[in-house]
């Protein structure tokens, strides 16, 4: 399966999506609660990149409910799971064309349109986590660069980046990698700009949407794969197939979600409804952080204790090899793409100050954990 469809290959799924959309697919939707009669409510249809049963689809529903509650029912967002209207990797263009009103996805999925897009969720991060990446977007100039990129790509969308994710694991493996040499010719699944990083390390990379990962592992098409870790990985059934999960990685330490709205539909909203959407995303960010701490840790424990998953920390030599690979990737992409280079320059300057400050002030968690629980974290 190709990593991502290009514009020329999107016509068929988009036409199919248009027919489905016009027929009013309602099955399996998550709807914001209604506080007004349906005839009085404005309704947006938002498709996600996630299977219906996945926690990420639930996050989209959490955002939609907040919009409904905050608007008093004036704006309703119906959430459709992956592939309800168009394939997951076709969502950006579908929102641009108005085939769906909105989307819930991640920036790395549009890597095939412009590698710079993936820097808003992939990349070396320079020591940032997801929260510091969003801080750069809101206070370090990232939002202006993000909007400039969308204009350059001629996508008529309004985007909101929110919801920082935990650092993603190296992934699920049949055989434990001991060094970067073990990535040579490894058939591995990832997405976004991380595709280039792992290719630099010698892997044979496939970029598959979430719904296809389990089957690819089960059939032997893949030797290893990463999705996002924690609860979503368990919901995909990855620990049913693989019993070794390598924790900690620099391939996606600072990813966040993306909300996309068709520009014409968003601009037509009343100012207070636009503000509600923006602030609902911020409120959903906080709720998501709390929910992730609860669900990820709970499922991490269950996978270890009831599914006999062996969790292993990634060797430092592999982490160092990832950073060297990132250096080569960003150097090459920056030469070919001036906006890519400007985004990297902005992120690096922000991280130099903010990550340095955080490293100075944060107390080590592992020391307190060992003191109180008598074992390493």
Image (cartoon, rainbow, N blue to C red):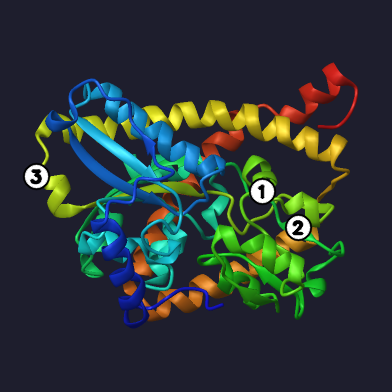
Counting from the top left corner in percent of width and height, residue 11 is at 30, 77
- Residue 85: x and y in percent read 36, 59
Question: Which mark is drawn over residue 248?
Answer: none
Disc tally is 3
What residue sits right under mark 2 in the picture?
172
Q: Is residue 76 visible?
A: yes
Q: Earlier in the sequence, mark 3 or mark 1?
A: 1
Query: Would you place residue 136 above or below residue 10 in this image?
Result: above
Going 15% across and 49% down the picture, which residue do you hit? 265
The residue at which mark 1 appears reads as: 233
Nearer to me, 288 or 12: 12
Residue at the spot of label 3: 268
Q: x and y percent of residue 110 in the render?
A: 40, 65
Between discs 2 and 3, the one toward the N terminus: 2
- Distance Cα–Cα, label 1 vs label 2: 9 Å
* Mark 2 to mark 3 CA distance (whole Å): 45 Å
Secondary structure at numbered mark 1? helix
């Amino acid at each position: 399966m190709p990593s991502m469809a290009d514009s020329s290959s999107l016509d068929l799924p988009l036409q199919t999506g248009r027919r489905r959309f016009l027929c009013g697919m309602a099955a399996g939707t998550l709807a914001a609660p209604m506080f007004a009669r349906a005839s009085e409510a404005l309704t947006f249809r938002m498709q996600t990149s996630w299977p219906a049963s996945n926690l990420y689809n639930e996050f989209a529903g959490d955002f939609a409910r907040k919009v409904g509650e905050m608007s008093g029912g004036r704006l309703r967002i119906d959430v459709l799971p992956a592939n309800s209207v168009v394939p997951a990797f076709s969502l950006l263009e579908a929102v641009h064309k108005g085939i769906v009103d909105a989307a819930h996805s991640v920036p790395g999925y549009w890597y095939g349109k412009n590698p710079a897009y993936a820097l808003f969720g992939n990349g070396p991060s320079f020591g940032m986590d997801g929260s510091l990446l969003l801080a750069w977007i809101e206070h370090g100039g990232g939002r202006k660069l993000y909007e400039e990129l969308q204009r350059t790509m001629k996508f008529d969308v309004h985007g909101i980046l929110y919801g920082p994710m935990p650092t993603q694991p190296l992934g699920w493996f049949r055989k434990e990698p001991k060094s970067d040499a073990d990535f040579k010719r490894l058939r591995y699944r990832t997405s976004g700009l991380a595709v280039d990083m792992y290719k630099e390390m010698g892997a044979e990379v496939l970029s598959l949407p979430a719904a296809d990962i389990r089957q690819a592992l089960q059939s032997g098409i893949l030797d290893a794969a990463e999705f996002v870790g924690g609860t979503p990985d368990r919901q995909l059934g990855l620990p049913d197939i693989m019993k070794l999960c390598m924790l900690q990685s620099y391939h996606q330490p600072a990813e966040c979600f993306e909300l996309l709205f068709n520009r014409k539909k968003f601009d037509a909203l009343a100012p207070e409804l636009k503000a509600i959407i923006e602030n609902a995303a911020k409120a959903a960010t906080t709720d998501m952080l709390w929910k992730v701490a609860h669900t990820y840790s709970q499922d991490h424990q269950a996978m270890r204790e009831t599914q006999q998953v062996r969790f292993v920390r990634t060797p430092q030599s592999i982490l160092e090899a990832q950073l060297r690979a990132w250096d080569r990737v960003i150097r090459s992409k920056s030469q070919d793409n001036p906006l890519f280079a400007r985004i990297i320059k902005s992120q690096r300057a922000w991280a130099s100050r903010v990550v340095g400050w955080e490293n100075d002030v944060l107390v080590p968690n592992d020391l307190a954990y060992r003191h109180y629980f008598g074992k390493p974290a």
